[in-house]
């Protein structure tokens, strides 16, 4: 089965372009640390991010994605609050409140190659349970990156995320996961956030992957709202999302979106 998956290996020249795209994404997510606060709208975040992408003379990866769709994504960022897992759409009337958590997922295109990353932020003072959720989700990503090495397998990544989540009392979203990335925003392979060790596609140098744990306080089950994009937890429990784009190298890996 895994032999039928066509994973496009990237050259060093291609990875360099993705490094440039990824660096901007990392800088944007870093700049949001001080920008996000109670009282601003999700549209304010969108405008702040899009301005940085335009200033860098790059393109916003999510805007109008996927091309040719009857319902393309209309924004540069997915901005998801509290029980929203992914794909929340910016809204000038949606104001952040003290105690919220908000994930921002964005991407850029440089000379035809993509960068993609996400981070979940605390808005003002958040609950201890929410703090733990953010910390564990980010740790799940870091643990997955550590194991994303040549000759390991995709199942090792999923197993690592799932184990980190469940050992801390959280669930992992099963309907969405990470993906390959390169000349397209989403490429093979799909990267589940659950699984078994030593199973799945073998990792090799030249693969570029977007690893993105999504952890919930309650059930792993989700649903999509009527807008056709916004995904929420079925039990309305909090959800967090962290993501990095990484390149597998012959000696290990490189995180292309880390500041």
Image (cartoon, helix red, strand yellow):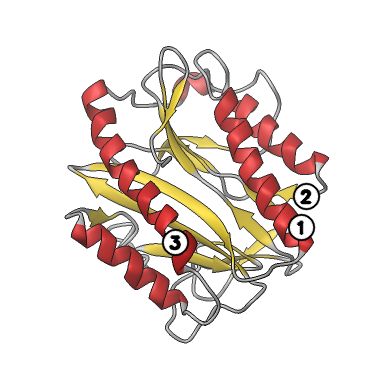
- According to the picture, the residue beneath numbered tag 2 turns out to be 170
C-beta proximity under 8 Å, tags 3 and 1: no
Q: Secondary structure at mark 1?
A: loop
Q: On the picture, is 106 further left or further right than 15?
A: right
Q: CA distance from mark 2 to mark 1?
A: 5 Å
Residue 63 percent coordinates (x, y): 31, 62
Q: What residue is drawn where x is 75% and y is 35%?
A: 163
C-beta proximity under 8 Å, tags 2 and 1: yes
N-terminal-most mark, 2 or 1? 2
Residue 15 at least partly seen: yes
In the picture as drawn, the residue positioned furthest to the front comes out as 34
- According to the picture, the residue beneath numbered tag 1 turns out to be 217
Q: CA distance from mark 3 to mark 1?
A: 24 Å
For mark 1, does the 10 Å Cα neighbourhood hold few (<14), some (14 to 19), or many (20 or more) residues? many
For mark 2, does the 10 Å Cα neighbourhood hold few (<14), some (14 to 19), or many (20 or more) residues? many
For mark 3, does the 10 Å Cα neighbourhood hold few (<14), some (14 to 19), or many (20 or more) residues? some
Q: CA distance from mark 3 to mark 2?
A: 26 Å
- According to the picture, the residue beneath numbered tag 3 turns out to be 32
N-terminal-most mark, 3 or 1? 3
Q: Is residue 58 above or below residue 142?
A: below
Q: On the picture, is 20 further left or further right than 45?
A: left
Q: On the picture, is 232 further left or further right than 89?
A: right
């Amino acid at each position: 089965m895994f032999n039928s998956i066509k994973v496009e290996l990237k050259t060093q020249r291609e990875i360099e372009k993705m490094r440039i795209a990824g660096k901007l994404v990392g800088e944007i997510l870093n700049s949001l640390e001080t920008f996000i606060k109670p009282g601003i709208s999700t549209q304010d975040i969108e405008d702040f991010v899009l301005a940085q992408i335009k200033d860098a003379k790059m393109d916003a990866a999510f805007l109008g994605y996927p091309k040719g769709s009857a319902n393309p994504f209309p924004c540069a960022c997915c901005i998801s609050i509290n029980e929203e897992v992914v794909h929340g759409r910016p809204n000038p009337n949606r104001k952040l409140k003290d105690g919220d958590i908000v994930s921002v997922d964005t991407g850029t295109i440089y000379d035809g190659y993509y960068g993609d990353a996400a981070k979940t932020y605390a808005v003002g003072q958040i609950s201890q349970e929410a703090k733990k959720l953010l910390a564990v989700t980010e740790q799940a990503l870091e643990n997955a990156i550590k194991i994303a090495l040549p000759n390991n397998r995709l199942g090792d990544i999923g197993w690592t995320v799932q184990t980190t989540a469940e050992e801390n009392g959280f669930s992992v979203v099963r309907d969405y996961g990470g993906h390959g990335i390169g000349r397209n925003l989403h490429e093979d392979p799909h990267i589940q956030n659950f699984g078994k060790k030593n199973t799945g596609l073998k990792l090799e140098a030249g693969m570029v992957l977007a690893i993105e744990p999504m952890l919930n306080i309650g059930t792993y089950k989700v649903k999509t709202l009527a807008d056709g994009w916004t995904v929420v937890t079925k039990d309305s429990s909090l959800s967090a999302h962290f993501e990095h784009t990484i390149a597998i190298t012959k000696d290990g890996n490189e995180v292309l979106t880390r500041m």
